[in-house]
Structures are given as structure tokens and as C-alpha cells.
Image: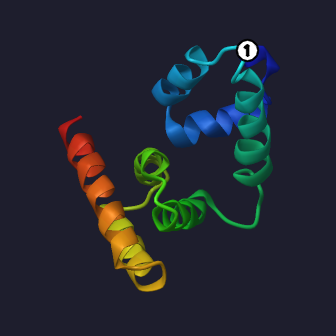
């Protein structure tokens, strides 16, 4: 399966999300999801994450904000981990989620803080 994936996108995906996550996603891929894996690797991880306009820390801030605002909790959890890997501090993640509360609403931020709290507790245990 990895032979069909964009090499630059796959490298970025691994750097941001970690080998364990990417290996699990690819191992769970089958004929139904293989094209989707290729799509997100090429267009999200190479086409967007490798653009020069924002660095990875900035892209993590944007990603956390959008995922929190849209209540995409599973993706948010994954990207809280990625944000730490991209150099955001716990305090910066907290500030991002406070900003979400003002612009996307308190309920969205409340949900996002719950997700972040669980992830950050797990990360502390690792």
C-alpha cells in the first residue's frame, strides 16, 4: 500500500502524526479506503502541509481551531498530539482553545478542552 503513496506527503504525515499512527491507519486500509489514504497523503500532507506559507506550528494552530469548532473530536485528539510534536506547548494549545471559545462558541471549546485534557493526560503518562 505505501508504494502507491506520495513519498513527500507520507514523510510529512509520519513526522506530524508519528509512525505508530500512520502505520495503524495504513494497516487498517483496504480496497475501500486505499484511495482515500492516497488522497489525504497527497493533497493534505504534501499539497497543504508542505506549502511554504505557514510553518508546522502555525498549521497545527489552524488545524486545532477548525477541528474544535467543527466538533471533530477524534481528529482533534490526533492533532493535539501532532501539535505537541510540532512544537506547541500545552499553554499554547490552551490558548488556541480559549480563542475557539470566543469565535466558535463556549460549547465547542468545552468539548475541545475535554478532548485535549484526555490527550494531554495520556501524553504525560507516556
Residue placed at 72% from the left, 47% from the top?
44
Report x, y in % for residue 89.
35, 62
Please state the total of marks drawn on the protein image. 1
Q: Residue at x 61, y 20 (%)?
A: 26
* Rendered image quadrant of residue 56: bottom right
The residue lying at 27 percent from left, 50 percent from top is 120
Compared across the picture, whether 107 is left or right of 3 comes to: left
Q: Residue 122 location in percent, x, y?
A: 24, 41
Label 1 environment density (alpha carbons within 10 Å; few <14, some 14–19, many ≥20): few
Where 107 sits versus 88, above or below? below
53 to the left or right of 123: right
Q: Secondary structure at mark 1?
A: loop
The coloring applied to the image is rainbow
For the N terminus, the image quarter is: top right
Give the residue pinned by disc 1. Answer: 31
Classify 93 as above or below 78.
below
Q: Quadrant of the C terminus?
A: top left
Amino acid at each position: 500500500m505505501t508504494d502507491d503513496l506520495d513519498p513527500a506527503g507520507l514523510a510529512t504525515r509520519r513526522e506530524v502524526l508519528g509512525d505508530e499512527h500512520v502505520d495503524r491507519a495504513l494497516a487498517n486500509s483496504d480496497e475501500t479506503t486505499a484511495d482515500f489514504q492516497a488522497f489525504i497523503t497527497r493533497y493534505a500532507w504534501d499539497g497543504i502541509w508542505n506549502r511554504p506559507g505557514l510553518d508546522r506550528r502555525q498549521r497545527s494552530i489552524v488545524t486545532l481551531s477548525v477541528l474544535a469548532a467543527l466538533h471533530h473530536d477524534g481528529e482533534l485528539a490526533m492533532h493535539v498530539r501532532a501539535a505537541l510534536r510540532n512544537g506547541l506547548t500545552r499553554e499554547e494549545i490552551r490558548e488556541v482553545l480559549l480563542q475557539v471559545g470566543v469565535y466558535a462558541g463556549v460549547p465547542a471549546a468545552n468539548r475541545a478542552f475535554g478532548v485535549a485534557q484526555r490527550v494531554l493526560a495520556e501524553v504525560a503518562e507516556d
